[in-house]
Image: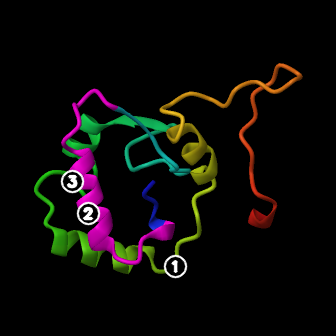
Amino acid sequence: MVTLLNLPEMSQLHASVQKLFRLPDSTRVFVGHDYKAPGRDEYQCETTIGVQRRHNLHIREGISEDDFVCLRNARDINLNMPALMLPAIQTNIRAGHFPAAESNGVSYLKIPLDVF
């Protein structure tokens, strides 16, 4: 799994995204964003490879690795972990499916105690 929180180098993130961009445009991606992007009125937890390849402000097609690394290092230095990162990770590792229901019939996304 690739997150900004476990990559020592933004160039690794760029290389990982380039691998993802080889997937079909229709491939669903569940994101940990907890903000409304410019021009969007609603929060969005799902996108596609094609949308990101064409419209991602930071790493769409045509953004060089050097430009990406400079942009992200300057932007990310003071960011906190996004509020929806942990739910997105739990959904992504299950290919978009929620966890199996527990004995009470309810599915839960679990948050580590040390987050608070």
Which mark identifies residue 95?
Answer: none
In the rendering, at what x and y percent does residue 97 appear? Answer: 56, 27
Amino acid tagged 2: His
Provide the residue designation for mark 2: 14
Cβ atoms under marks 3 and 2 closer than 8 Å: yes
Provide the residue designation for mark 3: 18
**Which residue occupies 29% across, 57% down?**
16
Mark 2: few/some/many CA within 10 Å (<14, 14-19, 20+): some
In what element is the residue under mark 1?
A: loop
Q: CA distance from mark 2 to mark 1?
A: 20 Å
Mark 3: few/some/many CA within 10 Å (<14, 14-19, 20+): some
Provide the residue designation for mark 1: 78
In the rendering, at what x and y percent does residue 91 appear? Answer: 56, 37
Amino acid tagged 3: Gln
Q: CA distance from mark 1 to mark 3?
A: 25 Å
Vertical order, 97 against 83 (above or below): above
Vertical order, 68 against 102 (above or below): below
Cβ atoms under marks 1 and 3 closer than 8 Å: no
In the rendering, at what x and y percent does residue 38 appear? Answer: 39, 50
**Which residue occupies 23% across, 50% down?**
19
Amino acid tagged 1: Asn
Residue extent of the magenta highlight = 5-27
In what element is the residue under mark 2?
A: helix
**Which residue occupies 46% across, 80% down?**
77
Mark 1: few/some/many CA within 10 Å (<14, 14-19, 20+): few
